[in-house]
Amino acid sequence: MKLTKYILLITVSLLISCKNDNKEISENSSMKPEMSENKGVNVNPIEHGALVLESDDDIIYIDPTAGEGAFKNQKEPTLVLITDIHGDHLSIKTLESLSLEESIIVGPKAVTDKIPSTICKTIVTINNNDSYKHNNINIKAIPMYNLREEALKFHPKGRGNGYVLSTDNERIYIYFRRHRRHS
């Protein structure tokens, strides 16, 4: 039941507003992320679609955007998952500001093609329906795309990934699909 609540919490919070604000959070930001605690996973929303999942073994950044200050008080990631190429999912500037030398970045080909090799030693491409195993986490890439006719151009089918993260006792569903506008 707790897992279902977390999945619902993550899905609702990520679907509420997905727009490209192109703003950064300063190091002195008054925004204080709230921690949601589960037996094995803490969910820490950063801003917009960016969040950090923290377990005993891994720190996973999802769509790290919002600039260096947004992640100042976070542990260094072991894994970074990026869903799409828009600035509210992929920020090269934010990635460059993070310490990713020992991390693994995972994303669809459209994303990994845009990431300079100087940012991270290990960049893994997984496209829709591909899987990747990281430590005890099975990662399944699922299609992420818009359904509304007027929004199809922002997330065409086959380009972006949602992710299902599975461990022995938990499953976390990460999916972004609604955008109000893009620049």
Image: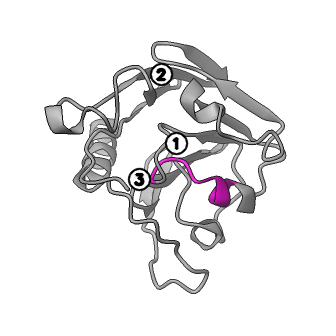
* CA–CA distance in space, label 2 to label 1: 22 Å
Question: Which residue is disc 1 drawn over?
Answer: 40
Looking at the image, is mark 3 or mark 2 earlier in the sequence? 3
Q: Is residue 88 above or below residue 149?
A: below
Q: Is residue 92 magenta?
A: yes
Tag of residue 49: 3
Q: Please state, as top left, top right, bottom left or bottom right, where the N terminus lies in the image.
A: top left
Query: Label 1 amino acid?
Result: Gly
* Residue drawn at the location 26% of the way across and 48% of the way down: 15
**Quadrant housing residue 172:** top left
Please, which colouring scheme is shown? Answer: one colour
Q: Nearer the viewer, mark 2 or mark 1?
A: 2
Looking at the picture, which amino acid does disc 3 mark? Answer: Gly
Q: Is residue 154 magenta?
A: no
Q: CA distance from mark 3 to mark 1?
A: 21 Å
12 vs 10, left or right, is: left
Image: magenta residue range: 88-95
Q: Which disc number belongs to residue 31?
A: none
Picture disc at residue 141: 2
**Residue found 66% across the figure and 60% down from its top:** 93
